[in-house]
Amino acid sequence: MTKQKVLVTGGAGYIGSHACVELLEAGFEVVVVDNLSNSKPESLARVQKITGKTLSFYQTDIRDHAALTDIFAKEAPDTVIHFAGLKAVGESCEQPLLYYHNNVYGTLVLVEVMTAANVKQLVFSSSATVYGESSSPQYSEHFPLGAINPYGRSKAMIEDILRDLSAADHKNQVQNPWKIALLRYFNPIGAHSSGLIGEDPNGIPNNLMPYIAQVAIGKLSQLSVFGDDYPTPDGTGIRDYIHVVDLVKGHLKAITALNGDKFKDGACNAYNLGAGRGYSVLEMVHAFERVTGKTINYKISPRRAGDLAECFANPELAWQELDWKVEKNLDDMVADTWHWQTLNPMGYV
């Protein structure tokens, strides 16, 4: 049996680089397409160091139709994992056109090229931000969608496009129909246990855990905790955190599912990837202090507009249909984050 080849868009990024490690170690051939707008080629050098295996890399923007067509013609991948996209909520509110052009138009170009190359297996990096407000803090896949910022709306638009593609193939009884897994992430944190790859955000981190780590190492002076008057046990917002390695293993499980009976006639199915429980901001701070022995300097700031009090996944569908569940706990997430941060205080520089 020939090795399956997976093309990974955004493969040099935080989640993409961890996916490349798991793919290579599982025996897949890996082709990375990344424009390096929010990532560094050093991450891919380290992926190859961790695994002792090589991958192919093209520094290309997925919006470049001609370049992407050439890559598909040369590499002939079996499956695509699509991570490439801008992901800062605040920036998306300030520059919505940038997000719609990069995320939505980029995906349109990608699926046009995939269709022309007859490559119709796709694992899409979606987000829990596609959900609307709910009476329950635990989100299931059947909940209504209603993203409240341009980043989330760009992900929801892409999901709509992919569902429409799948439905059209089903209606027309196409011989090689689209097989698509939409993976809705909650809050990925942590790093590879080697400490060689991890989250290296440009500028001030948008996410809680890298911000805490940069305060702990002295790169930033203080953490702002936005709101301590939510209806939660300690007043701070609760989110579902998942180790990045557990998250990317969900993508390998999704590929297995796409190759199986459930998708044999084509389908476009959404799955939550989360731990199924939440931790508050202060719980995360105190866990970091406990595991690392470092004191985190923080201050309470006003709530941010649009933030929910509590949000976490119902991951049962992924358990049932993908045979996936998280294996790592909060201490693992903190320890691996700190290991990465101490070995790489300035990131990949």
Image (tube, rainbow, N blue to C red):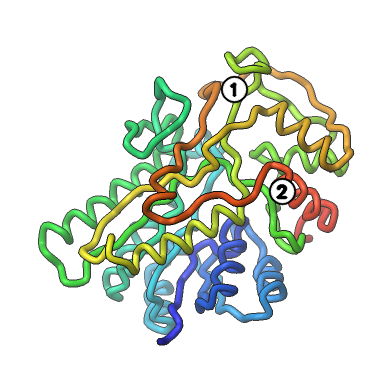
Neighbor class of circle 1 (other Cα within 10 Å; few <14, some 14-19, many 20+) is few
Q: SS of the residue at dot 1?
A: loop
Q: Which mark is residue 45?
A: none
Is 110 on the left-hand or right-hand side of 232? left
Q: Position of residue 154 (x, y in %)?
A: 40, 43
Q: SS of the residue at dot 2?
A: helix
Three-letter amino acid code at the position of disc 2: Asp
Q: Residue at the spot x=56%, y=75% of the render?
A: 57
Q: Position of residue 209 (x, y in %)?
A: 70, 40
Using the image, determine if residue 298 lies above or below residue 34: above
Using the image, determine if residue 89 lies above or below residue 243: above
Using the image, determine if residue 208 lies above or below residue 261: above
- The residue nearer to you, when weighing 102 against 147, is 147
- Label located before the other in sequence (1 or 2): 1
**Residue 205 found in image quarter:** top right
Quadrant for the N terminus in the image? bottom left
The residue at which mark 1 appears reads as 304
Residue at the outermost bottom position: 1
The residue at which mark 2 appears reads as 332
Q: Position of residue 336 (x, y in %)?
A: 74, 52
Q: Residue at the spot x=71%, y=24% of the render?
A: 225
